Amino acid sequence: MTRDEIVSLIERGGEALLAEADAARKHHCGDAVHLRGIVEFSSVCSRNCAYCGLRKNNLALRRYTMDEDDILRVVAEAERQGVRTIVLQSGESEAYRPQWLARIIAAIKKRFDLAVTLCVGVKPLVCYRMWRQAGADRYLIKHETANPALYEKLHPDSHLDQRLDALERLRMLGYQIGLGNIIGLPGQTASDLADDILLARDRDVDMAAFGPFVPHPGTPLASCPPGDIEISLRVVAVARLLLGAVHIPATTAFDAIAPDGRERALQAGANVIMADLTPLHYRNLYQIYPSDRAANSVARVKAILARLDRPLATDQGHSLKQRTEATPCGAHPRA
Ligand code: SF4
């Protein structure tokens, strides 16, 4: 697919595109949907991304960091409910010590039969190595937009190159890696979205998340319109066709812009879904964007899958790619 063809599909693709992507998903991933259980363990953030409710300058938000026992209690309950991957997510900050997080990762890997994904931002190499040695399997660094000028505009205190370099370091340490964008950012074009998909292809990632923009009232983008559901579905569909055997989630933001958003994404190429495991009193404080945080439970996910007649995957859902010595994720079994 050329870049122009991708742009054209994002702008004008119809039902046939979504159906073709659904068939490609079935071919590459099967019908089973992988459930990732998210624990948002710290809402402290030192950055000021223009679209995010957790940005440092949003002083209206009370901040928290969960303690180790709380996190492990949540993980135990998640495993009981059938979750096979835990995503440990936080703002980008120094609110906790890297050694503390390493201890938690090691405890999860020792006590439970679970994969661990980290989504805690750009960190020094020594942290990535420490967490990998503790047992972390995967690392997500969302790039948000592949357009460097737009990236700089929305991120006053970070650089796109830094994030992409971090992904390469993580890959060399043996992590399964993922990136992701936001669809519908002010000033973003269909060409930018095509570049997001091409970036995921060129970086040969194991996971790629494409989710719509949802404005947060405590940010400079409060008055901007949300991402368009149809365009967002087309981006997921084209990504599936172009990326093939890659994990693509029906991101939670889809439900924030349409009541059946995640169901539709799962029928347009997505094969992964998330449930929020964070205790409710913390969950309401982890506001990247406004949404019905209480609704995103494991039970809700199971109800969605029942409606779609799609089974919940029983394996940990590792990378769908065969790795070689040069890209050592081969240590993980194929899903
Ligand atoms: Fe912090 Fe991440 Fe939000 Fe940026 S997107 S403000 S780094 S939590």
Image (cartoon, helix red, strand yellow):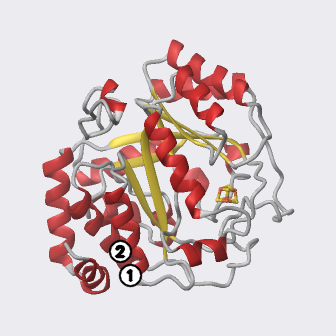
Which percent across, then down, holds residue 45? Answer: 76, 52
Question: Which disc, if any, is residue 191?
Answer: 1
Quadrant hosting residue 206: top left
Q: Is residue 268 left or right of residue 279?
A: left
Mark 2: which amino acid?
Answer: Ala
Name which residue lies at 19% across and 72% down. 1
Asked whether mark 2 lies closer than 8 Å to ligand 1, one says: no
Q: Residue at x 29, y 36 (%)?
A: 313
The amino acid at mark 1 is Ser
Image height of 211 relative to 322, above or below = below
Q: Which type of secondary structure does the marked residue at label 1 adopt?
A: helix
19 and 48: which is toward the camera: 48
Would you name the residue on which mark 2 appears? 194
Question: CB of mark 1 within 8 Å of CB of mark 2?
Answer: yes
Q: Position of residue 8 (x, y in %)?
A: 26, 85
Between 122 and 291, the one nearer to me in the picture: 122
Label 1 lies in ligand 1 vicinity (Cβ under 8 Å): no
Q: Residue at x 48, y 17 (%)?
A: 112
Ligand 1 in which quarter: bottom right
Compute the Cα span from label 1 to label 2. 5 Å
Q: Secondary structure at mark 2?
A: helix
